[in-house]
Amino acid sequence: MTGRFDALEASPGSDAEREAFRALQASLPGMFARLIPDRLAPRTIVVLPSLSLDAEVMARIKGVHHYEERMLGMLTLLRLPRARVIYLTSRPIPETVIDYYLHFLQGVPSAHARARLRLLCCHDGSLRPLTEKVLERPRLLARLREAVGDPSSAHIAPYAVTPLERTLAVRLGLPVNGCDPDLSALGSKSGGRKIMREAGLAVPDGAEDLADEAQVAQALAALKRRRPSLRRAVVKLNEGFSGEGNALFSFEGAPSDETLDGWVEARLENLAFEAPGMTFADFGAKIREMGAVVEAFLDGEGKTSPSAQFRVDPSGAPSCVSTHDQMLGGPSGQVFLGCSFPADGAYRALVAAEGGKVARLLARRGVIGRFGVDFLCLREEGEWRAYAIEINLRKGGATHPFLMLEFLTDGALERGSGLFLTPLGHPRYYVASDNLESERYRGLTPQDLVDLVVLEGLHFDGSVQEGVVFHLIGALSEFGKLGVVCVGASPERAQALYERTKTILDGAQQDCAAAGVCPCAPEPS
């Protein structure tokens, strides 16, 4: 017992903490082997949706603190009759939102599931990572330990694993179903390019491990010399998120002689940033803080941006769990807005196979948990060519929509086709977005959304396994922003549900204003 107490008190980042974390992680394979096959086995899942990423980059994402709600789909684990879920957040989640997710449980009364759900909140809306807030609240930590109960059947399900999550895991004495933070460099922009090249994938021409603005300028000039026809290049912060850490450099008017280096250096401050409000001074400081890469901005016939998602289970076995076509926006089309599942059949197998090379290499390096590999696909000489862009060594924007599809339908990915099949063998497709956004949505409360869903018949219908599931509901009223997963029996049906959802939301406030009262509200008894 004394040894365990010593581990709990190990200094953050110390060798003692690392040793304790590795010991906890060593328990995962046996725990999962014991629990996964037995749906009646008692278990506790601590859901930790902490966006433990660069705070300044995250601050530029509208309504970012509500992104902690993206993992609420994991409440469907409560369909396991003896599972308990502890969900941590910075701010309280309205009961309307909790009830919305519990309604998706089939075969389990909502009251039974709610009794096995514990919501713990820091009551702190600052932009610091949730995990940091939990760690600085000893009484909350004590309540969390008490809620966990038997640690031999409990684990932490994180969004990402950083040194903060490692410290929390050791303080709680619980393993994490995710990657050791000592391996996180493998998922940085620089580390990812190296891993993808080592795995034999085609990677855009460029350079990594750039430590300051001068090195970025030198790398841009060298890239232009290697590729004289190149029109644009991308500068990416090593720890950028959803494309918000990217900037575009234009070679328009670049000289072809020895003056190129000076020309690039003089124009570096003209970088076009994807993140709103980003300045060159801020971006330069981030380059010096976390490093950066430079790579050619690829253009070509049929350019698309698919991704492949993988999971390495606690035993070290990698598998492809999904493919998606990404919906991108921002000034130059580099910011993740959403995705459609599955990726186009023309290159679906290609990106799964290429990404699988990366997954196997990462598994050999000791990576576990979920991660994604992003690609650009171009048609070259009549054939599709996949260029690997980056590795996201964490859950991403394409993770929770697919988890929702699995939980809602009890279906599975068919390995050969890459399609998702229900238990009856029927395919399902979806269109998902974290960025369904409009000023017209501001003022709609979670209850208003539920009323609209019921009135308009948008709610996911388990009997036909089609419909719409919402997330980021807490961001709706203040930011006019919402997440959505539209599940259909065909790609066309999924897209139609997505378009109908936007149309209904677009007209919601106008309908209420015209009627003088909300037409979707229940009549008084």
Image (tube, rainbow, N blue to C red):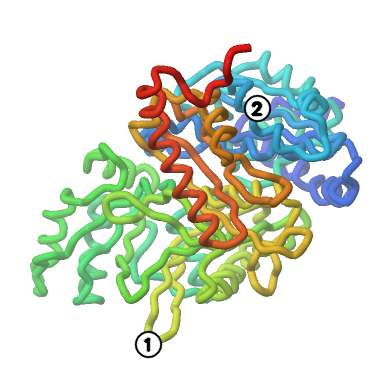
Left or right of 193: which side holds 311? right
The quarter of the rendered structure image containing the N terminus is top right
Rendered residue at 64%/68% (across/down): 418
Where 56 falls versus 205 (above or below)?
A: above
Q: Which residue is mark 1?
A: 381
Residue 442 in the image: state x and y as whole percent: 39, 27
Q: Nearer the viewer, mark 2 or mark 1?
A: 2
Report the front residue among 96 and 290.
96
Can you tell which quarter of the image residue 313 is in?
Answer: bottom right
Q: Do the residues bearing badges 2 and 1 touch, measured as CB atoms within 8 Å?
A: no
Report x, y in % for residue 9.
70, 25
Check the picture and name the quadrant holding the C terminus: top right
| Residue at the (67%, 57%) spot, across then down | 311
Which SS class for mark 2? helix
Label 2 and label 1: CA atoms lie apart by 52 Å
Q: Secondary structure beneath disc 1? A: loop
Asked whether residue 151 is in view, the answer is yes
* Left or right of 450, for residue 297: left
Left or right of residue 257, residue 327 in this image: right
Residue closest to the eye, 327 or 489: 489
According to the picture, the residue beneath numbered tag 2 turns out to be 98
Question: In terms of image quadrants, where is residue 362?
Answer: bottom right
Residue 52's spot in the image, x, y percent? 52, 36
